[in-house]
Image: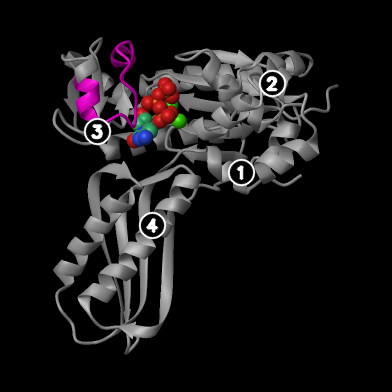
Amino acid sequence: MSDHRKIIHVDMDAFFTSVEQRDNPALRGRPIVVGGNEKRGVIAAASYEARKYGVRSAMPSAQAVKLCPQLIFVPHRFDAYREVSGQIRDIFAEYTDLIEPLSLDEAFLDVTENKLQLKSAINIANQIRRKIKERTQLTASAGVSINKFLAKIASDVNKPDGITVILPEQVDAFLEELPIERFFGVGKATASKMKEIGIFTGHDLKQYSLVQLAERFGKFGRYIYHAVRGEDNRPVKANRIRKSISKETTYSANLMTSEDIKAAITQLTKQLHESSAKRNIIGRTINLKLRYDDFATITRSKTISYYTNTAEVILSVCLDIINDIGPDNRGIRLLGVGLSNLNTELSYDYQLSLEF
Ligand code: DCP
Ligand code: CA
Ligand code: CA
C-alpha cells in the first residue's frame, strides 16, 4: 500500500460568470464579465468566451472593451456565489472534514482517510465533480496528487471541467517540465527574477542548491527547493480561510487636527496595501477604527462594488467615512484601517505558512 497522502484540490470554472450564465440563458455562449462597467473599474471574472479575446480578471474595464467591444458587463450577485460556495462545501463534507477553503470557489481536501472508506482519490474527485454538476449546474476542475502544491497546480491543467492526476511516480517528470510561472506561489515578479538567473522550468530550478535559493529568495526559496522535489508536508487545515486584514497604530501624542488624521490614515493605508498585496488579498469592505482620548471606540465600514487593495482607493473610502462621522473635539489615540469581505486567493498565504 502506498504511504502517500491523497490530496484533492477543487476549483470552480470561471466562477462568477458561470453562475451568471447559469441564471440568465441570454448570457450563455457570450463574452461576459462580472465587475466594473464599460467606463471604469476592474474586471473580477471573465467568461471563457471573453477570455478568447484576452480579457482577464483584474484587467481594467477600458482595456477589456478595447479587446472585445461586444463585451457584456454583468453586476455582481455575491449572495448567489456564496450560496454555491456553501453547496460545494456540503459536497466535500460528505467525504472528509479535512477541508481547507482558499476562497469561495476552491478548496483542498485530504481524503487519505475518508468517510466512505474509498481507496481511490480519483474516484472521489470524479464523484465530487459529478455532484457539483448535478446540484449546481456548474462545472469544477480537480487536481489529485500527494500534496497541496501538486494538487493545486494539477487542478488548473485540464480546465474547464477537467481532472488531472499526478501519481507519485509521475511527480518528478511533471515538475521538471513545468514552466516556472506555473509553480504555485511564483508570481510575476519572482518568475522574472528566476528567469534572469536561467530558471525557466522545474528542471532548471533543481540545479540550484537550497542555500543558493534561500540566499536569493529567502523563505520562499527554501520552500520552492523542496516543492520542486515533490516535498510539501503542509497539512490540509480545516477552515483556515482569512476573514479580514488590518493595520492599526496607537499614537503617543493624540491626533488633534484633520491634517494629522489624514496623514496617519495615509500611512496606515500604505501599510495595509503592502501587507495585503504581498498575500494577494483583495477586499470589498473597508473598515475604519477610531479610539478617542476618552477611550470611546467606534468602527465604521463601507462596502464598494469591486475588490481592491490599492492604497488610494482605501484612503479615499476612509476619508469618506471620516467625513460621515463629522468633526469631534476629542483627540484620537488610535486608528485602524482594514479590509474584509475578502476574496482570498491563495498563493501568498502560502508563503507565510511554510514550515519545513
Ligand atoms: N475574482 C475577483 N477578483 C479577482 C480574481 C477573482 O473578484 N482579481 C473572483 C471572480 C472569480 C472568482 O473570484 O470568478 C474565482 O477566481 P478564480 O481565480 O478561480 O477564477 P475563475 O473561477 O473566474 O476562473 P478559472 O476557471 O480560471 O478558475
Ligand atoms: Ca475558479
Ligand atoms: Ca479559485
- The quadrant holding residue 227 is top right
Q: Residues within 10 Å of mark 2 (few under 14, many from 20)?
A: many
Pick out the residue farthest to the front: 196
Spatial separation of the CA atoms under disc 4 and disc 2: 35 Å
Secondary structure under the numbered disc 3 in the rendered image: loop
- The label number, if any, that marks residue 202 in the structure image: 2
- The label number, if any, that marks residue 270 in the structure image: 4
Which amino acid is tagged 1?
A: Gln
- The quadrant holding residue 197 is top right
Which amino acid is tagged 4?
A: Lys
Task: Find out if the beta carbon at label 3 lies less than 8 Å from the nearest ligand 1 atom.
Answer: yes
Spatial separation of the CA atoms under disc 2 and disc 1: 18 Å
In the image, the segment drawn in magenta is: 47-65
Q: Residues within 10 Å of mark 4 (few under 14, many from 20)?
A: some
Determine if residue 115 is in view.
no
| Residue occupied by mark 1 | 351
Which amino acid is tagged 3?
A: Gly
Q: Residue 297: percent from the left, percent from the top?
A: 32, 78
Secondary structure under the numbered disc 1 in the rendered image: helix
Q: Quadrant of the C terminus?
A: top right
Q: Earlier in the sequence, mark 3 or mark 2?
A: 3
Please say if 237 is above or below 154: below
Question: Is the residue under label 2 in contact with that under label 4 (CB below 8 Å)?
Answer: no
- The label number, if any, that marks residue 135 in the structure image: none
